[in-house]
Image (tube, helix red, strand yellow):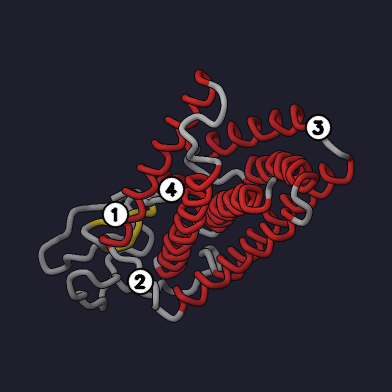
């Protein structure tokens, strides 16, 4: 089963039979070793079968200078998010116009798709995405903030709160990422995206707010749903990072982990910004 995050799914982070692991060069389970699923570390001897529906505890990979570590992920994520914030500040201070911001957003989207379909991480491409995404977010936030004072800061605080809450719940195993959890999140996400696409088409061709999924009472409901979905994707991202470290993924995967986390956090921020604009708007 492919990962929920398109970044990780292209790099082989996947789930087979409810278990988390890599499938870049995965082989079918072998007799006497039904968990032979790690192409980076060979057969993961010593691991124990898990009860149905329980998350799989991946085997510990031997320490190696060429393996991804949590410090690598934190450092790359800090660089990527730092660049997003820095460029957002530039767009805000300079008063970047919305047409230019939309252009930057489109460029960021193209760069993100290019990276998703690349077979290797490209730090330059990821950082370029972060720069253009920051310009888009900064200009959009400035625009919304002119009508709803403090909206941008509230969205930032909301995003930080969700990130912290999900991290704590995940580390304490209150949130357990299983196959059922994955399927639920993916089904909800697909439904959400389809509804938003239909709403956008009605808005483009019919004018106004389309079906009203992004304004009024329905807008508030779908804004909350968007934030919740973002939080659930964060849990899936944390699981992918944890499994990558445990399986001994190459160090370059830290850039993809940072990229995936950035995509999810941007999603949550935008949903918060939209929700706050609806709640506090005239």
The disc at residue 97 is 3
Q: How far is disc 4 from disc 1 in space, using C-alphas?
A: 20 Å
> Mark 1 = which residue?
183
Residue at 56% over, 68% down: 65
Do tag 3 and tag 1 residues touch (Cβ < 8 Å)? no
Compare residues 133 and 191 and report the one nearer the observer.
Answer: 191
Q: Position of residue 113 (x, y in %)?
A: 53, 35
Compare residues 263 and 69 and report the one nearer the observer.
Answer: 263
Circle 2 Cα neighbour tier, 10 Å, few/some/many (<14 / 14–19 / ≥20): some
The answer to whether residue 252 of the structure is visible from this angle is no
Asked which quadrant contains residue 208, the reply is top right
Q: Which of marks 2 and 4 precedes in the sequence?
A: 4
Compare residues 27 and 110 and report the one nearer the observer.
Answer: 110
> Mark 4 = which residue?
11
The answer to whether residue 120 of the structure is visible from this angle is yes
Name of the residue lying farthest toward the bottom: 172
Residue at 47% over, 51% down: 221
Q: 98 above or below 274? A: above
Q: Which of marks 1 and 3 precedes in the sequence?
A: 3
Q: 101 above or below 131? A: above
Q: Nearer the viewer, mark 4 or mark 2?
A: 2
Q: How far is disc 2 from disc 3 in space, using C-alphas?
A: 43 Å
Secondary structure beneath label 1: helix
The disc at residue 57 is none
Quadrant in which the C terminus appears: top right
> Mark 2 = which residue?
176
Residue at 61% over, 70% down: 71
Q: Position of residue 201 (x, y in %)?
A: 47, 25
Q: Position of residue 108 (x, y in %)?
A: 64, 36
């Amino acid at each position: 089963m492919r990962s929920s995050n398109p970044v990780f799914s292209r790099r082989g982070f996947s789930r087979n039979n409810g278990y988390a692991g890599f499938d870049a060069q995965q082989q079918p389970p072998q007799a006497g070793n039904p968990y032979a699923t790690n192409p980076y570390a060979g057969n993961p001897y010593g691991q124990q079968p898990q009860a149905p529906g329980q998350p799989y505890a991946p085997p510990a990979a031997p320490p190696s200078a060429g393996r991804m570590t949590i410090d690598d992920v934190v450092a790359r994520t800090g660089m990527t998010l730092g660049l997003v914030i820095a460029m957002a500040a530039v767009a805000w201070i300079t008063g970047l116009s919305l047409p230019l911001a939309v252009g930057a957003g489109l460029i960021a989207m193209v760069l993100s798709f290019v990276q998703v379909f690349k077979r290797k991480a490209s730090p330059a491409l990821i950082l370029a995405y972060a720069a253009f995404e920051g310009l888009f977010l900064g200009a959009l936030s400035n625009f919304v903030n002119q009508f709803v004072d403090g909206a941008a800061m509230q969205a930032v605080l909301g995003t930080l709160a969700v990130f912290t809450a999900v991290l704590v719940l995940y580390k304490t195993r209150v949130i357990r990422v299983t196959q059922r959890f994955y399927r639920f999140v993916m089904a909800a996400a697909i439904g959400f995206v389809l509804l938003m696409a239909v709403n956008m088409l009605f808005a483009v061709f019919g004018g106004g707010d389309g079906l009203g999924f992004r304004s009024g009472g329905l807008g508030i409901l779908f804004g909350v749903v968007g934030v919740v979905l973002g939080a659930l994707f964060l849990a899936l991202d944390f699981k992918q990072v944890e499994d990558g470290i445990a399986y001994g993924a190459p160090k370059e995967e830290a850039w993809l982990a940072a990229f995936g986390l950035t995509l999810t956090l941007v999603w949550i921020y935008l949903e918060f910004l939209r929700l706050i604009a609806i709640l506090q708007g005239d």
